[in-house]
């Protein structure tokens, strides 16, 4: 046999061996997949109601383990989340209890993704029913669900998605009289997806008073631009009539000026409330009110926007539960010229104090990062003040960047934003003095600048 023929035989033999190994691996994977499919099929069959399989059992599936993530089906279903968060962080999610109040376009999507993310216990609260017109934005409802209470509709569908979750559904309107009933049980988060101002304000005030973490949805109707959706403190939400009304009522009636994260849109509403149109002459708007005091006029809604609001809420809450730290984008209305002014001001200050600007290691783009991302457009000494609302970004006339540690260059991890008089005071003191006299301020600044080191890999 020639040398070339031997080489071909060796290649063919190696290929056959590799093919055999690959085939064995594929068979193992398929076998495992078949076992899981069979298990899931039997699980679904066991959920069918005995009466001809016409309905579904909305009870939870019992897992024979103290740690639900040890269950093969659950761990496989949540495998992408486990890969993203890590096992310990995902355990925090599966051990969490979240309340969602308001189960329309926003709330149903938020609840659905919390369930799919493995939250272990959900309380679903809404007094309303599924209507045909709500199907353009509801997360799971079908035509068969029209006329069904939204809370029970979600519970039914959720039991088929993640039956291990403990789900309680309350067909109930939230108001102060049921505060103890709904907000008890030490929830890890409360989601406010209510569109009635009176009820919304009452819920937010109750959560603040009880020390509960709450996340609120502002107006999603009459908007179309998904790129303008933001998460910020209630004080910083703009172009939103609902935010404005809620801010006013919380401050006036409860003395609450902020501290509540909200999802809102920077987009101005594209349409107004549609007027009430009666089908009969003797009818009035009150004839159509499910609950006295609730609006009967219609807000035009593009279904995608409330869905995105709900997804944003779920993502925010799940990452908070998993202790995954991230910084929301600040609402800072400065343009590039403002950042150039601050950069030029830094250069002038360096020349005045240090004799040259050679140790300025930032350009206008990096100044934007420092001012917007690190200091959120305000003085480092104003980070915890309550009066940091919608009017705080009007100019940079009183702001400048200075070195935090005067012994180090003026880089992204060594610049703080201060007002002129604060900058003068800072230049006349030392870090040791600040650490001794203002330990909390020192820790806060050190933490913020440490973030810059991490993000710029310094």
Image (spheres, helix red, strand yellow):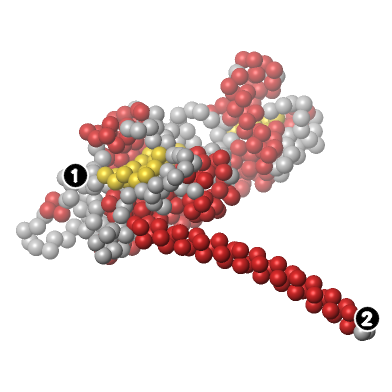
Nearer-the-camera pick, 46 or 224: 46
- Residue under numbered circle 2: 3
Indicate which disc residue 293 carries.
1
Question: Who is closer to the viewer here, 392 or 209?
Answer: 209
Front disc: 1 or 2: 2
Question: Which residue is at 68% across, 31% downward?
Answer: 402
In the shown orientation, is residue 437 left or right of residue 306? right
- Residue at the spot x=57%, y=31% of the render? 379
Work out which residue is located at the far front of the displayed protein and give it. Answer: 1
Give the SS element for disc 1.
loop
Judged from the image, the secondary structure of the residue bearing numbered disc 2 is helix
Neighbour tally class for label 1: few under 14, some 14-19, many 20 plus, Cα within 10 Å: few
* Marker count (numbered): 2
Q: Is residue 367 above or below residue 351?
A: below
State the image quarter where residue 146 is shown.
bottom left
**The C terminus: image quadrant:** top right
Q: Are marks 1 and 2 in contact (CB under 8 Å)?
A: no
Residue occupying the point 75% across, 74% down? 16
Q: Is residue 272 visible?
A: no
**Would residue 270 appear left or right of 360 to someone viewing this image?**
left
- Occupied quadrant, residue 201: top left
Q: Is residue 437 above or below residue 221?
A: above
Q: Which mark is residue 125?
A: none
Residue 423 x %, y %: 64, 26
Of labels 1 and 2, earlier in sequence is 2
Q: Position of residue 14 (x, y in %)?
A: 80, 72
The image shows residue 239 at horizontal and vertical percentages of 40, 48
Bin the neighbour count of mark 2 within 10 Å (Cα to Cα): few under 14, some 14-19, many 20 and up. few
Location of residue 116 in the rendering, given as x and y in whole percent from the top left corner? 45, 52
């Amino acid at each position: 046999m020639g040398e070339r023929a031997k080489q071909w035989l060796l290649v063919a033999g190696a290929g056959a061996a590799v093919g055999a190994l690959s085939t064995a691996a594929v068979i193992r994977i398929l076998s495992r997949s078949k076992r899981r499919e069979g298990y899931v099929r039997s699980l679904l069959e066991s959920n069918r109601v005995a009466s001809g399989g016409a309905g579904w059992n909305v009870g939870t599936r019992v897992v024979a383990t103290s740690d639900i993530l040890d269950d093969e089906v659950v761990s496989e279903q949540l495998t992408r989340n486990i890969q993203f968060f890590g096992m310990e962080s995902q355990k925090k999610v599966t051990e969490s209890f979240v309340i969602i109040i308001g189960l329309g376009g926003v709330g149903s999507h938020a609840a659905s993704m919390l369930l799919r993310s493995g939250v272990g216990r959900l309380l679903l609260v809404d007094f309303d029913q599924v209507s045909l017109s709500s199907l353009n934005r509801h997360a799971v409802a079908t035509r068969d669900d029209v006329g069904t209470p939204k809370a029970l509709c979600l519970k039914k569908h959720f039991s088929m998605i993640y039956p291990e979750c403990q789900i309680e559904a309350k067909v109930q309107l939230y108001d102060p009289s049921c505060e103890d009933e709904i907000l008890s049980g030490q929830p890890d988060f409360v989601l406010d997806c209510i569109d009635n101002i009176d009820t919304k304000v009452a819920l937010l005030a109750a959560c603040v008073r009880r020390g509960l973490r709450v996340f609120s949805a502002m107006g999603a109707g009459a908007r179309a631009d998904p790129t303008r959706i933001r998460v910020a403190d209630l004080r910083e939400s703009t172009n939103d009539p609902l935010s404005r009304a809620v801010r006013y009522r919380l401050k006036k009636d409860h003395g609450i000026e902020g501290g509540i994260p909200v999802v809102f849109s920077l987009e101005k509403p594209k349409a107004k409330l549609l007027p009430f149109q009666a089908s009969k002459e003797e009818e009035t708007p009150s004839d159509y009110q499910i609950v006295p005091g609730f609006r009967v006029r219609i807000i035009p809604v593009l279904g995608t926007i409330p869905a995105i609001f709900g997804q944003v809420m779920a993502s925010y809450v799940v990452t908070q539960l998993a202790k995954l730290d991230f910084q929301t984008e600040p609402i800072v209305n400065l343009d590039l010229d403002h950042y150039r002014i601050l950069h030029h001001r830094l250069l002038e200050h360096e020349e005045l104090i240090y004799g040259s600007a050679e140790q300025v290691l930032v350009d206008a783009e990096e100044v934007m990062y420092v001012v917007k991302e690190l200091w959120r457009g305000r003085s480092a000494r104003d980070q915890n003040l309550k009066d940091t609302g919608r009017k705080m970004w009007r100019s940079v006339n009183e702001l400048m960047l200075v070195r935090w540690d005067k012994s180090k260059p003026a880089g992204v991890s060594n610049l703080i934003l201060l007002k002129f008089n604060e900058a003068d005071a800072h230049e006349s003191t030392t870090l040791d003095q600040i650490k001794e006299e203002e330990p909390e301020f020192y820790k806060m600044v050190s933490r913020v600048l440490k973030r810059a080191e991490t993000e710029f890999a310094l």
